[in-house]
């Protein structure tokens, strides 16, 4: 236990920062309140650096008994890096109208109405949950980490934007999230009943032993399917995807960008960790490494998720709803890597989460930087002729949309290339073909988002669009756009640092007593 606490220092840094910003956000001094984003960014940089340094100690990792010892290094560093972009995106937008009222004297300071401190505190707590997920080694830890990731987002959706739409989105998100959590917990209970343990390494040993004797416990498989369906809510996969569009549209753009990356990362890591406990052979990739029931379920979820996401996105006029359903489609692409297996597939998923986080944040940064009549830009028609008035914002939106499409040689193209290559090498050719067809279909709405600012003539509606009062969303968008254009040059190096993050062999061997042998490893 003491060894595990050593590796929780990055999470402790974020938790301490959450306590600090919850206090500074309530200060009567505007200068002190304005320190909150800086504290958040400093904490994220410190936590990311500590994670990279701490997880380089292979000996201590082996003694700690993690299921996937090196996973924490990649996930925690990635989450902190994208978290900095997300924090930049939110500066100046939280409590914007309230701060304006305070400054002009239209309202007196009221700590009850100020939400800046709690917003950034929940921001950090949710990121802490993702980081804890990567170090989970039992079902209870995994469940609590996932809920720590999700619960703050319910409040963020409700408080970051005034109006009935955000309240409705928060209520819908909360109740559906509670249902998904109950499903996941029920699945975990069945897993415990079938294997006699909540420890992931022990569950893996039990399934390996059952597979070796040719008799996998049906109760365990049912529990796994139910648990995975609960996790599908976190990653917005079919059949738990239906909340995405309403919640994304109702939330403020910084929160929408946060929702598109943070819960999806925690959910995808959890999905892989659960699937890894079922692997019959660690050196076998593709569906042959999994029980046929689980392999077929993941295949169908992947196909339905990418197809329904793209079909529904084609029917939308709201930019946020388009990006919401495209997020569903991208989840389907990531599931190719899950089914492809541990050698290259899991690494491709982790790499694509980084790619998706950067390009999605850049796209939402443009929406956050613009407004019409004091409200966020959301309609496709608002983007017409944007390049003539705000060429930098139009350029960022164009680059991020093309990257989401997978246009070479942008960062998104490299991410999809890794995923599809892993799928082909694992024998998932038909799944990759379906994904390519879906990517081609997505060109319709991505090219529309990219082309409207440049090719369309301005309209009275679009000419009413102006930059918002904060320039920080523009800064986040420019940094994200620059990363999209340049990071493909070092993509091989990035993927190499992530390779082996999902290796469970050391954890399993460390959990065994001398003389034991687990077939299939």
Image (cartoon, rainbow, N blue to C red):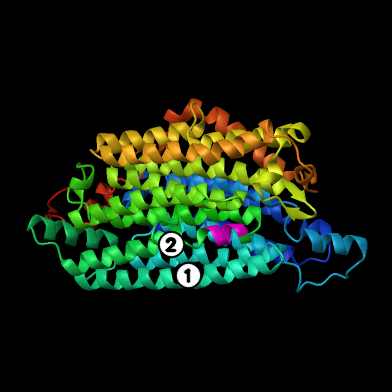
Q: Specify the quadrant of the image occupied by residue 499.
A: top left
**Magenta stretch: dominant SS?**
helix
Q: Over which residues does the magenta segment extend?
A: 245-249
Is residue 451 visible in the rendered structure shown here?
yes
Q: Does the stretch in magenta take in 164?
A: no
* Residues under numbered marks 1 and 2 in contact, where contact means CB atoms less than 8 Å apart: yes
Report the quarter where the N terminus lies.
bottom left
User: Residue at horizontal 61%, vertical 32%?
Assistant: 482
Mark 1 residue element: helix
Q: Residue 490: x and y, percent?
A: 48, 27
Q: Could you give the CA–CA distance between mark 1 and mark 2, rounded to whole angstroms?
A: 8 Å
Check disc 2: other Cα within 10 Å, few if <14, some if 14-19, many if 20+.
many
User: Residue at horizontal 14%, vertical 54%?
Assistant: 518
| Residue linked to disc 1 | 176
The answer to whether 167 is drawn above or below residue 388 in the figure is below
Mark 2 residue element: helix
| Residue linked to disc 2 | 233
Q: Is residue 84 left or right of residue 294?
A: right
For this rendering, which residue is in front, 165 or 220? 165
Q: Is residue 453 left or right of residue 443?
A: right
């Amino acid at each position: 236990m003491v060894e595990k606490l050593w590796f929780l220092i990055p999470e402790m840094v974020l938790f301490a920062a959450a306590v600090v910003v919850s206090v500074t956000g309530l200060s009567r001094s505007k200068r002190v309140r304005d320190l909150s984003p800086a504290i958040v960014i400093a904490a994220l940089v410190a936590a990311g650096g500590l994670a990279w340094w701490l997880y380089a100690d292979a000996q201590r990792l082996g003694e700690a008994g993690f299921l996937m010892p090196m996973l924490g290094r990649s996930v925690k560093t990635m989450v902190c890096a994208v978290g900095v972009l997300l924090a930049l995106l939110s500066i100046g937008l939280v409590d914007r109208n309230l701060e304006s009222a305070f400054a002009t004297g239209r309202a007196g300071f009221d700590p009850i109405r100020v939400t800046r401190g709690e917003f950034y505190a929940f921001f950090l707590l949710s990121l802490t949950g993702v980081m804890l997920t990567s170090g989970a080694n039992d079902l209870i830890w995994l469940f609590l980490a996932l809920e720590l990731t999700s619960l703050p987002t319910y409040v963020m959706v409700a408080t970051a934007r005034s109006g009935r739409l955000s309240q409705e989105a928060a209520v819908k998100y909360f109740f559906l999230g509670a249902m998904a959590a109950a499903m996941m917990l029920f699945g975990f209970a069945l897993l415990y009943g079938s294997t006699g343990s909540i420890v992931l390494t022990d569950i893996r040993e039990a399934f390996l032993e059952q597979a070796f004797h040719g008799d996998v416990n049906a109760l365990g498989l049912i529990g796994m399917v139910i648990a995975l369906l609960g996790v599908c809510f976190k990653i917005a996969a079919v059949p738990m995807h239906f909340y995405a569009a309403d919640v994304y549209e109702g939330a403020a753009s910084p929160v929408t960008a946060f929702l598109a990356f943070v819960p999806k990362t925690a959910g995808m890591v959890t999905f892989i960790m659960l699937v890894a406990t079922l692997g019959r052979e660690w050196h076998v990739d593709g569906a042959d490494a999994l029980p046929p029931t689980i392999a077929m379920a993941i295949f169908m979820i992947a196909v339905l998720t990418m197809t329904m996401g793209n079909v529904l996105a084609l029917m939308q006029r709201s930019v946020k709803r388009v990006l919401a359903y495209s997020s569903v489609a991208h989840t389907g692409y990531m599931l190719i890597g899950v089914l492809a297996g541990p050698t290259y597939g899991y690494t491709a998923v982790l790499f694509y989460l980084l790619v998706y986080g950067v390009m999605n944040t850049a796209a939402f940064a443009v929406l956050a930087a613009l407004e019409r009549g004091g409200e966020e830009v959301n309609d496709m028609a608002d983007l017409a002729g944007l390049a003539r008035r705000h060429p930098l914002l139009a350029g960022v939106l164009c680059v991020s949309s093309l990257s989401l499409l997978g246009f070479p040689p942008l960062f998104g193209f490299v991410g999809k290339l890794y995923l599809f290559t892993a799928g082909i090498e694992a024998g998932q050719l038909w799944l990759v073909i379906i994904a390519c067809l879906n990517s081609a279909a997505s060109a319709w709405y991505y090219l529309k988002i990219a082309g409207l600012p440049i090719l369309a003539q301005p309209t009275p509606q679009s000419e009413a669009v102006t930059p918002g009062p904060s320039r920080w969303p523009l800064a986040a968008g420019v940094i994200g756009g620059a990363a999209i254009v340049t990071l493909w040059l070092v993509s091989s190096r990035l993927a190499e640092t992530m390779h082996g993050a999902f290796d469970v062999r050391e954890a399993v061997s460390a959990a065994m007593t001398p003389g034991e042998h687990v077939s299939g490893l």
